[in-house]
Image (cartoon, grey):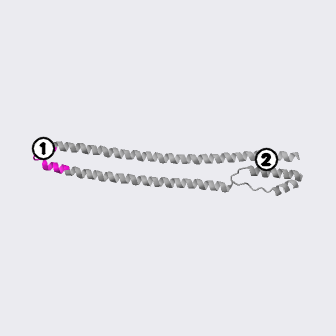
């Protein structure tokens, strides 16, 4: 915050030209100058810098979120590809075992039925595992989206709090200035 420039000489000259005695004009000038020095006013430059900081924070947060989302997409793609390869491998294994069972059918009819049933259970378990992993990934993505939304809402709330604080300070300044004007008029009328 910066102090507002106040020309005490011009203030005194204006009052003396209006008929106020020089001593009183100097006293008024000192009171007004002191009130300006004590006031913590936000300048246009301060407001511009604050807007720039808020904009930078928003830009940085959005960029960070984009990087995180990009990383999450890469992770999901990698896991999806891994599952795809795993399923492909399982299919190859199943085909190999199935072919092996066909060769043994002639002499091992009962064993073939048992092994075939075993493979069905194994495939069912693999499908369940795959569905569970897929559902787990969906929940993780949903949780990550919620986290992103929470961070976004938190940043929005922080910006609103900052705006409220600035509004309160500006209101305090306006009230102080409004309170000082009647005092100046009283002082002028007393002389």
Q: What stretch is highlighted in magenta?
A: 97-112
Picture layout, residue 29 above or below residue 116: below
131 left or right of 107 in image: right
| Crowding near the residue tagged with mark 1, few <14, some 14–19, many ≥20 C-alpha atoms within 10 Å | few
Q: Position of residue 128 (x, y in %)?
A: 30, 43
Q: How many labels does the image show?
A: 2
Per the image, label 1 sits on a secondary structure element best described as: helix
Labels 2, 1: front one: 1
Residue at the spot of label 2: 181
Residue 172 quadrant: top right
Residue 142 quadrant: top left
Q: Where is residue 75 in the image (x, y as percent from the top left)?
A: 39, 53
Callout 2 touching callout 1 (CB < 8 Å): no
Q: Residue at x 81, y 52 (%)?
A: 30
Per the image, label 2 sits on a secondary structure element best described as: helix
Give whichever of discs 2 and 1 has the lower sequence position. 1
Determine the CA span between mark 2 and mark 1: 108 Å
Q: Position of residue 95 (x, y in %)?
A: 21, 51
Residue at the spot of label 1: 109
Give the overall secondary structure of the magenta segment: helix
What is the residue that sits farthest to the left in this orientation?
107
| Crowding near the residue tagged with mark 2, few <14, some 14–19, many ≥20 C-alpha atoms within 10 Å | few
Q: Where is residue 71 in the image (x, y as percent from the top left)?
A: 43, 54
Residue 55 colored in magenta in the image: no
Q: Residue at x 41, y 53 (%)?
A: 73
60 left or right of 46 in image: left
103 left or right of 132 in image: left
Q: Which residue is drawn at 14% across and 43% down?
A: 111
Residue 106 colored in magenta in the image: yes
Residue 124, labelled with which disc?
Answer: none
């Amino acid at each position: 915050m910066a102090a507002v420039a106040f020309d005490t000489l011009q203030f005194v000259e204006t009052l003396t030209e209006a008929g106020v005695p020089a001593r009183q004009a100097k006293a008024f000038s000192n009171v007004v100058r002191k009130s300006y020095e004590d006031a913590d006013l936000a300048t246009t430059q301060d407001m511009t810098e604050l807007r720039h900081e808020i904009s930078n924070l928003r830009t940085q947060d959005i960029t960070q979120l984009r990087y995180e989302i990009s990383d999450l997409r890469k992770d999901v793609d990698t896991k999806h590809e891994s599952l795809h390869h795993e399923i492909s491998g399982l299919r190859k294994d199943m085909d190999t075992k199935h072919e092996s069972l066909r060769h043994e059918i002639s002499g091992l009819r009962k064993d073939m039925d048992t092994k075939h049933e075993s493979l069905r259970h194994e495939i069912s378990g693999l499908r369940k595992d795959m569905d569970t992993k897929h559902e787990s990934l969906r929940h993780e993505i949903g949780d990550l989206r919620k986290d992103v939304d929470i961070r976004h809402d938190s940043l929005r709330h922080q910006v609103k709090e900052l705006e409220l604080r600035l509004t309160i300070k500006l209101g305090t300044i306006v009230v102080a200035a409004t309170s000082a004007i009647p005092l100046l008029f009283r002082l002028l009328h007393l002389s």
